[in-house]
Structures are given as structure tokens and as C-alpha cells.
Image (cartoon, rainbow, N blue to C red):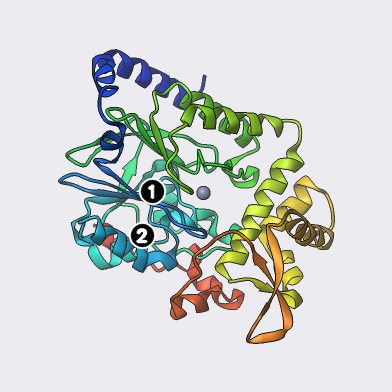
Amino acid sequence: MSIYCGALYLFVEAMQSIYGTIKNNIRNYCMTTLLHDHFLCYKRDFPSANSIIVQGPQPILIDTGFITDKDRTEQFLKEAGVQPHKLYCVVNTHAHSDHVGGNHWLQSTFDIPIAAHVWSASAINRRAHEVCSAEWLDQPVLAYHVNNILHEADEISTGAVRLTVLHTPAHTLDHIVLYDRDSQTLIAGDVLQQGDIGWLNPFHEGTSTLDRAIEVLECLAILPLRAVFGGHGSIMTNPDELIRESLRRYSSWLHHPEKMAWHAMKRIFAYALLIRNGIKETFVREYLQNTLWLKDYSTHVFRTDIKNLAEEVVKEMLRSGAAEWRIQSDHPQERVLCATVRYNACEDAELSRMFAPAVLAPFLPKHWYDQSKRSQ
Ligand SMILES: [Zn+2]
């Protein structure tokens, strides 16, 4: 049993004995009241991840969406009765761009502290090129600084809810979930999703990432759970079934690395199509051939020429219905490859400009300005 799984097991053992009586009492409460008294979820469409407010005298915000969702986040906070400057802190489940995109705005405007797991915190703070996997994925992330470094079994209290940090290193090495033992609620980030499973990246998270993903789910399966807030999609009230199905899908990849690769590549490319509002037909193959992720998959998984793989990726996106050719009214002579999932297009003209590949670089971590003085 790994260190993190062992710690989780001991934690559950202790919790089950201490909270056995409370647990029985909880069953008598109205579920809706129990689940929603202190948790408010903003369910976003792609390319953004959900945000969750955990209420209390010291309210916290878990994950901040994609950078284009700043205004929607502000509205969500205000409608929940939380003035942004009153937030106690932001907690990130992990550092992917769709979960940390609002960090810069909340920190630079309201001086809100950011909390993240120790396995990415120091790298983010020293501006390591590949934090957030931003260059590899070709996704913009605005600079931020991690003020509060989290470890396994740390507790974060809002004054009304006490959340326990559980380290779940699979989808990313820095991934954490947050567990409220009283309401048996889990904030799961990308570990659990309704109708999908978190994509896995062996190039950044290690070749054993699939084994760890299975182990993480086996550990979560021993937690008493009534509700799960995932990073994407609606609240999940069938956690046992969901964990079983996720385990089944991950296990089916154990002897088929190419399936894991296709699952990841389709999600990464769909995401690129979403944040750019589609990519023109004349540019799409060149775009793919210049991404670091496709270079890795062509070299290490498929052992094929990157041009061939780029062609196959476009074909597979069309075949599976994940993407389609569209004609845009301002350029009727040229087709654009667009993702088909429901999403929130970027409404901010200034931010939209950053998604042109030529200007994306300034928003990658290697170009972040040094804001270390902010942490003093
Ligand atoms: Zn993620």
C-alpha cells in the first residue's frame, strides 16, 4: 500500500470510529439541506472547470475556472453572498489551466491567498516552464503565487466546514481532493467525473500513472460518500457506481496503452479547439505537428511520423463526433474544425486575442513575471 493510500486508510479508520455516532444521526437529516447548506457549486461548461464555494465565516473557493471566466466567477461569488475580497482563500484541486485560470485575477485584485499541494507549489512559485503542463498542452495560464502549501491530511476550516486534504496523484501528481467527513461530501476535481474519467498523462505524471489512478479510486471507494462535486458536470449522488465504472474503464487500459493515448489526445485537442473557437482547415495540421503532446505520442506511444498521427487525430475527431467542420460567416470560403461539446465561448475581446497561436507564448509560465515579492 502506498504512503498516500496508507494515510487515507488510517484516516478513514479513525474517522469511522470517532464519527460512527454522528454518521448514524446524519442519515436522519434531509439530504438536500445536508448537502447544500455550505456547498455551492458553479457548474460551468467547457473549457472551464466547476468552482465550489464552501460557506462559513471564512468562505473558500475551490478552483477558479479558465481565465476567460473571471466575470462569471465574480457574479457567482456575489450571488452567493460572498464579496470576492472576503474570500479566506482559493484552494486548487490541481494546476491545470481550467482549474487555476481565475487565480491571477483574485490574487492581483483582492490579494486572496492561493492554496495548492506541495508537489506543484514550489515549482509554480519558481516559475518552472512546465508547471500547469501549460506549454505541453498549449494552454494559457496567467501568473499566480501559491501562498499556502498543502500536504496529505491537512485540514482547511471555513468556520462551518472542516475539509480534509487527501492527496490523489494520478490525473496530475499534485492532485488533491477535499473531504468533509460530517456531510460525507467529496470535492473531487478531475478524479471523478459524471460520464467520463480523468485523462492520464504518462509523459508528465510518470509511466505508472494508470496504476496510481486505479489505486486512488480503490482508496476513495472506502470513504463513506453521499455526494461528490466533480471538476466537470453535475453533482454526483451515486459515487459507488461511479467509482466502479471508472475503475472498469481504467482497468481496460492496462494492456492497451494506445486506448489511454487516444482518450487523452482527443480531450487535449478538443480543448485546443474550444479555447480558440475552432482552428482553420489550412492551419490545423501544422498546428497539431507543432504541439509538444503530439510529438510525445507519435514518438513514444505510436512510433510513427508526427504528420501521419496529426492526420489520424483529425480523422478520429471527425469519426467520433468530437469535432466537425463548420463554415464561419466572416470567412465563408474556409472550413474551420470545431469541437462539438457544449461550451462557453470567450466573450472578452482582449482575452480572445491571446488564443492566436502567435501570441500565446506570453501567457505560458516561462514568461510569467516574478511576483515573489507578493508572498512576503
Ligand atoms: Zn485536469
Q: Amino acid at mark 2?
A: Asn
Residue 75 x %, y %: 30, 64
Estimate the spatial distance between the alpha carbons at disc 1 and disc 2, rounded to whole Å.
9 Å
Residue nearest the viewer, comparing 42 with 28: 28
Secondary structure found at label 1: loop
CB atoms of marks 1 and 2 within 8 Å:
yes
Quadrant of the drawing holding the C terminus: bottom left
* Label 1 Cα crowd, 10 Å radius (few <14 / some 14-19 / many 20+): many
* Label 2 Cα crowd, 10 Å radius (few <14 / some 14-19 / many 20+): many
In the image, is residue 282 above or below residue 330? above
Residue 249 appears in view: yes
In the displayed structure image, the side of residue 13 where residue 191 appears, left or right? right
Give the residue number, with chain letter if any, for mark 1: 92
In the displayed structure image, the side of residue 194 where residue 34 appears, left or right? left
Precedes in sequence: disc 1 or disc 2: 1
Q: Which image quadrant is residue 360 in?
A: bottom right
> Residue 117: which disc?
none
Residue nearest the viewer, comparing 244 with 367: 244
Q: Amino acid at mark 1?
A: Asn
Residue nearest the viewer, comparing 277 with 5: 277
Q: How many marks?
A: 2
Residue at 62%, 56% in the rendered image: 268
Q: Cβ of disc 1 within 8 Å of ligand 1?
A: no
Residue at 68%, 57% in the rendered image: 322
Secondary structure found at label 2: helix
In the image, is residue 370 above or below residue 52? below
Determine the residue located farthest toward the left in the rendered image. Answer: 57
In the displayed structure image, the side of residue 171 where residue 80 appears, left or right? left
Determine the residue located farthest toward the top in the rendered image. Answer: 17
Give the residue number, with chain letter if any, for mark 2: 103
Residue 370 appears in view: no
